[in-house]
Image (cartoon, grey):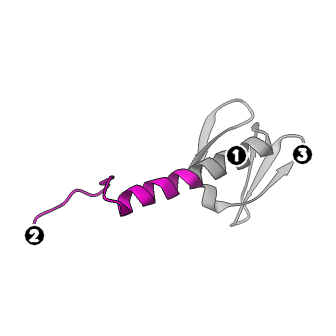
Amino acid sequence: MILVHRLKGEPVFVNADLIGSIEACPDSLLVLVDGRTLVVADHPNDIVERIVRFRASVLVAADELRQGGLALVPDVER
């Protein structure tokens, strides 16, 4: 999820994997894969940077899990 801001400044989290495209007109228009749209105040370049950082953080967490350094699910004895 990435943080963007509605035109009046209200924060909203959007699933980065559901963003199909971003249009600048002059506000940013997020077009989701299901066709819904969301007009936000954030610049398209900032949104793309947030998506890249979010995806990088997912890869880092996955690597830490693989190496045994991050436990998201506690061990449960059966």
Residue 66 is a magenta residue: yes
Within 10 Å of disc 3 (Cα), the crowding (few <14, some 14-19, many 20+) is few
Instruction: Tell me which numbered mark, 3 or 2, is placed earlier along the sequence.
Output: 3
Q: Nearer the viewer, mark 2 or mark 1?
A: 1
In this view of the protein, which residue sits in the foreground, 60 or 22?
Answer: 60
Element carrying mark 1: helix
**Type of amino acid at the residue the image marks with label 1:** Glu
Residue 34, position in %: x, y?
69, 67
Which quadrant of the figure has residue 68?
A: bottom left
What residue did someone put label 3 on?
Answer: 25
Taking the view exactly as shown, the residue that stands out farthest to the left is: 78
Residue 26, position in %: x, y?
89, 41
Within 10 Å of disc 2 (Cα), the crowding (few <14, some 14-19, many 20+) is few
Instruction: Tell me which numbered mark, 1 or 3, is placed earlier along the sequence.
Output: 3
Instruction: Kindly identify which numbered label has been placed on residue 78.
Output: 2
Q: Nearer the viewer, mark 1 or mark 3?
A: 1
Residue 61, position in %: x, y?
44, 54
Instruction: Tell me which numbered mark, 2 or 1, is placed earlier along the sequence.
Output: 1
Verify CB contact (< 8 Å) between mark 1 and mark 3.
Answer: no
Taking the view exactly as shown, the residue that stands out farthest to the right is: 25
Magenta extent: 55-78
Residue 59 is a magenta residue: yes
Taking the view exactly as shown, the residue that stands out farthest to the bottom is: 78
Cα separation, mark 3 vs mark 2, equals 56 Å
Location of the C terminus by quadrant is bottom left
**Type of amino acid at the residue the image marks with label 3:** Cys
Element carrying mark 3: loop
- Give the left or right position of residue 44, taking residue 11 as reference: right
**Type of amino acid at the residue the image marks with label 2:** Arg
Cα separation, mark 1 vs mark 3, equals 19 Å
